[in-house]
Image: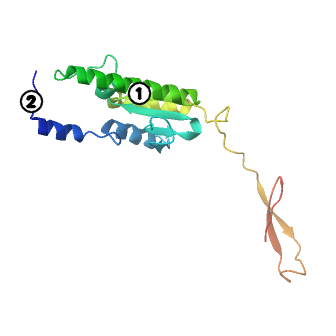
């Protein structure tokens, strides 16, 4: 099958394809952010520059396009009819690089999640993703962080000191565990 647009137009169309801030990536980012999860974008210190990085959890999330990264069994992972050999070589290189990147991250102790473009269309999937992120433990923590129990604070009267503030009483806040500096 021949291309339906001229080579100049096709070149312009292909040049417009972005590597970051893609529509599926933005869908995932907005959903996770609205779920209260905070992340770092495109951390260049990690192999493959993951789309989303949760450093405290040592979690890297890649948002892959089904076409470019060959989502197995997906209807969007088609191979163009023209220059088939070129495309097969390119797709094989993409898949190999993805595998090497994931292996390198896992060897360094990171958890890797791959989100496929077709999955971002389902709000149920996005909720499961948010739950999966929440269930990855924070590095160095064996259980979820519990809010610290607040110690009751009480006012304690101290008689005025003759050296400082003569004639005034000093009030200090003291926690149940011990005195703190006060005025």
Q: Which of 127 and 50 is in front in this view?
A: 50
Q: Mark 1 points at which residue?
A: 97
- Give the left or right position of residue 107, taking residue 51 as reference: right
x and y percentages locating residue 30 in the rendered image: 39, 42
x and y percentages locating residue 98 in the rendered image: 42, 27
Q: How crowded is mark 1: few (under 14 residues within 10 Å), some or many (20 or more)?
A: some
Up-down relation of residue 180 to residue 32 (above or below) = below
Taking the spot 33% from the left edge, 35% from the top edge, the residue there is 24
**Residue 4 numbered tag:** 2
Residue 27, visible in the rendered structure: yes
Taking the spot 25% from the left edge, 24% from the top edge, the residue there is 87
Tell me the CA gap for discs 2 and 1.
31 Å
* Rendered-image quadrant of the C terminus: bottom right
Q: What element carries label 2?
A: loop
Q: Nearer the viewer, residue 99 or 57?
A: 99
Taking the spot 90% from the left edge, 81% from the top edge, the residue there is 162
Q: What element carries label 1?
A: helix
| Marks 2,1: beta carbons within 8 A | no
Q: How crowded is mark 2: few (under 14 residues within 10 Å), some or many (20 or more)?
A: few
Taking the spot 45% from the left edge, 30% from the top edge, the residue there is 129
- Give the left or right position of residue 11, taking residue 152 as reference: left
Circle 2 or circle 1, nearest the eye: 1
């Amino acid at each position: 099958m021949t291309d339906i647009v001229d080579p100049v137009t096709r070149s312009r169309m292909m040049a417009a394809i972005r590597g970051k801030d893609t529509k599926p990536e933005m869908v995932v980012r907005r959903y996770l952010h609205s779920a209260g999860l905070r992340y770092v974008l495109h951390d260049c210190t990690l192999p493959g520059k993951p789309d989303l990085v949760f450093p405290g959890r040592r979690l890297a999330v890649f948002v892959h396009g089904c076409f470019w990264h060959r989502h197995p069994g997906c209807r969007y992972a088609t191979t163009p009819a023209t220059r088939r050999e070129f495309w097969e070589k390119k797709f094989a290189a993409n898949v190999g690089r993805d595998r090497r990147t994931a292996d390198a991250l896992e060897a360094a102790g990171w958890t890797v999640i791959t989100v496929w473009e077709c999955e971002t269309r389902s709000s149920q999937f996005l909720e499961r993703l948010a739950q999966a992120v929440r269930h990855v433990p924070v590095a160095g923590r064996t259980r979820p962080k519990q809010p610290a129990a607040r110690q009751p604070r009480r006012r304690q009267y101290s008689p005025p000191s003759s050296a400082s503030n003569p004639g005034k009483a000093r009030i200090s806040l003291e926690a149940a565990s011990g005195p703190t500096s006060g005025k």
